Amino acid sequence: MPAPAPSLDDILHPLQERFGALDTTTFRGQTRLVVPAEMSLEVLGFLRDRGFDLLVDVTCVDYLEYRGAKQRYGIVYLLASTATNQRITVRVFGDDPEPTVASVVPLWAAANWLEREVWDLFGIRFSGHPDLRRLVMPEEFTAHPLRKDYPMQGRGERHNFPILTREDG
Amino acid sequence: MALELPENVVVSRLDELASWCRKNSLWPMPFATACCGIELMATGASKHDLARFGAEVFRFSPRQCDLMIVAGRVTMKMLPVLQRIWLQMHEPKWCISMGACASTGGVFDTYAVVQGIDRFIPVDMYVPGCPPRPEQLIQAIIDLQDKIQREGTITGREFDTAERQLRKRALVDSSQLLSLDAARNPVVQRELSAAAQQH
């Protein structure tokens, strides 16, 4: 059995000292930070230098129909430390129109495709991304399908193809 | 495409002979995209041997095959590839749509999955199941062999005209059938434009 992860207070205290009061919550052993969009690259760089060397995932939540939501998009960064087994979640909020967040590709190379997927499915622009284009949907697809206002069955793109009959050979 | 030959007894005997040869040496082109592909491999393996029905080799080159087995869901990104492979196959060629996803989209009624490849490819046999057991796929191959024997001609006349194919395919008159494609279905487009004008 691997040793349980040490608590995150030794990370959070320097963080609060450097960046001021950040919204921090802990629930059942999982810690979550909310960071304003202007500071996101600095905070994530700070965390990477403090040992969170693994970017597990970059994803997004669409709060369009959520009670009490102040901003529409919450971009989620899941970080892990391979040395100390700690995990932390960093959340950055963005809003319509043109939600934009700084790209963390300079910090973790893995963020390249992770951010491309978020751009493809949610429409969040990552400023400073070297190659921001669609990853899972075809290039000519125009919508962002995982947004809450996009219907699950799509808008007819899936059947917009030529029909081959027996005569076409 | 088809040779012009007068119909007579010799030709009909030749038709039967040619169909017999073709049905007993169907070489499948496995277009396995998802889970049904595993069952397709199982059907080709030793326990449920597909080779005893003549489907000896699973060639992955469309130029060398005459039967395309679409096993698994086909996404909108994959469909142009499927169509290109279909066009690269030589005639006479047949298509089996294996599993629920290839036949109708299965459980995946989403923006990315094509709801049935028969919207875009002519399909001869449908195999229901999720996934269909190997025995079901073998039954489909046997039924396809019967179909080839019944309707096959040496010159490939049965692939010539749309009417000939439609007579065999469905009970519905195709002119009455609205396009399943939302972009070309006049009823859907009328409703969408009416809804757009209201806003």
Image (cartoon, coloured by chain):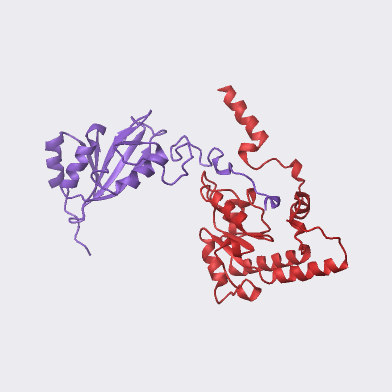
Q: Which residue is drawn at 12% across and 47% down?
A: A10
In the image, B90: left or right of B4?
left
Image quarter of the N terminus of chain B: bottom right
Q: Which residue lies furthest to the front in this view?
A: B4
The image shows residue A86 at horizontal and vertical percentages of: 21, 52
The image shows residue B59 at horizontal and vertical percentages of: 56, 67
In the image, B28: left or right of B149?
left
The image shows residue B17 at horizontal and vertical percentages of: 77, 71
Q: Which one of the lettered chains is coloured red? A: B
Number of marks in picture: 0
Image vertical order of residue A19 relative to residue B20, above or below: above
Residue B174 in which image quadrant = top right
Along the viewing direction, whichever of B187 and A120 lies nearer the viewer: A120
Q: Which residue is drawn at 55% across and 47% down?
A: B109
Along the viewing direction, whichever of A98 and A24 lies nearer the viewer: A98
Q: Which residue is drawn at 74% across and 54% down?
A: B169
Residue A53 visible? The answer is yes
Q: Which one of the lettered chains is coloured purple? A: A
In the image, B9: left or right of B133?
right
Residue B131 visible? The answer is no
Along the viewing direction, whichever of B131 and B7 lies nearer the viewer: B7
Along the viewing direction, whichever of A12 and B82 lies nearer the viewer: B82
